[in-house]
Amino acid sequence: MKTVVVGCGRLGSELAYRLFQRGHHVTVMDILPESFNRLPSDFKGRTIAGDLLSRDLLESADLAHADGLAAVSDSDSLNAVIARIASVKYHVPNVVVRNYDPALRPVLETFGFQIISSSSWGAQRIEELLDNPRVRTVFSAGNGEVEIYELLVPPIWEGKTIQDLTEEAKNCLIVALTRNGHAILPTPDTRLQNADILDISATAEGIACLRGILDVQKEG
C-alpha cells in the first residue's frame, strides 16, 4: 500500500516507521527537513520537506495514487485542510486526521473524517484507570464513544443472569463470557459464577452506571 504521513513529529515518525515495517510504501512530509531525524536509520521511505499546502509538494507526494493519508501534524487546522484536499481533490480513499485540541474536534467531525483525538482519548483512559481499576479497557472504538471492557465478576453477582445485569446497567452489552479459560457467547439466561470474566461493550454512560452498581454493592 502507498501511504502518506503528513507531519514527522513524535507521532508521525512512529507511525511512518510502523507502516514501513508492515510493508507499506511510505512518504513522509514535513515543513522542516530536520524533523526527519526522528525516523530510525533503517527507514527506507520517501521524505519531502517544504510548504505542506504547496501544490507542487502535494503532487510530488503522488497523492493521486495513495491508498491512505494520515494528517498528524501538530496543527489541527493544517491537518483539516490537507485531509480535505486529499479526500476531495485527489480522492484518497482512506484519510485519518489527528486532533490535538478537543475544542476543535467538532469542526473536524463535520467533514466526516476518521479522527483520532489523542488528548480526549488519553484523558479518558487516565480517568478510567484512576476512577475504577477493577474495570479494564481492552478495546476502544472511534475516540472512546464505545469501548469494550473486561470485568472480573465479583462474588455478589453469583447466580445473576446476563439479563439481570443488562437490565441494571443501561447502555451495556455483554459480548463474551470467559469461564475457566473458555470463552462463550452468553445468552440472556446465562447465570454468572464468581470469577467469570465478562467482556462488556458500553458507552461512557453505560460503564459509569455499571461502576456505580459495583460501588454500591461493594459498600453494601
Image: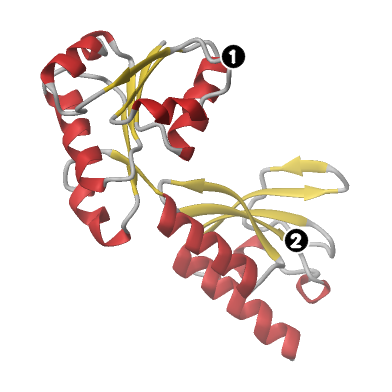
In the rendered image, which quarter is residue 184 located in? top right
Residue 190 image point, x, y percent: 71, 56
- The image shows a total of numbered marks equal to 2
Residue 155 image point, x, y percent: 83, 73
Distance between the alpha carbons at the discs numbered 2 and 1 = 54 Å
Residue type at mark 2?
A: Arg
**One can see residue 104 in this view:** yes
- Which residue is labeled 2 in the image? 191
In the rendered image, which quarter is residue 154 located in? bottom right
Residue 159 image point, x, y percent: 79, 69
Residue closer to the observer: 50 or 136: 50
Residue sitting at x 53%, y 10%:
23
Residue 120 image point, x, y percent: 41, 59
- Horizontal side of 128 relative to 80 (left or right) equals right
Q: Which quarter of the image is occupied by the C terminus?
A: bottom right
Residue type at mark 1?
A: Asp
- Which residue is labeled 1 in the image? 42
Residue sitting at x 85%, y 43%:
181
Badge 2 marks a residue whose secondary structure is loop
- Disc 2 packing (10 Å; few <14; some 14–19; many ≥20): some
* Picture layout, residue 106 above or below residue 157: above
Q: Residue furthest right?
A: 180
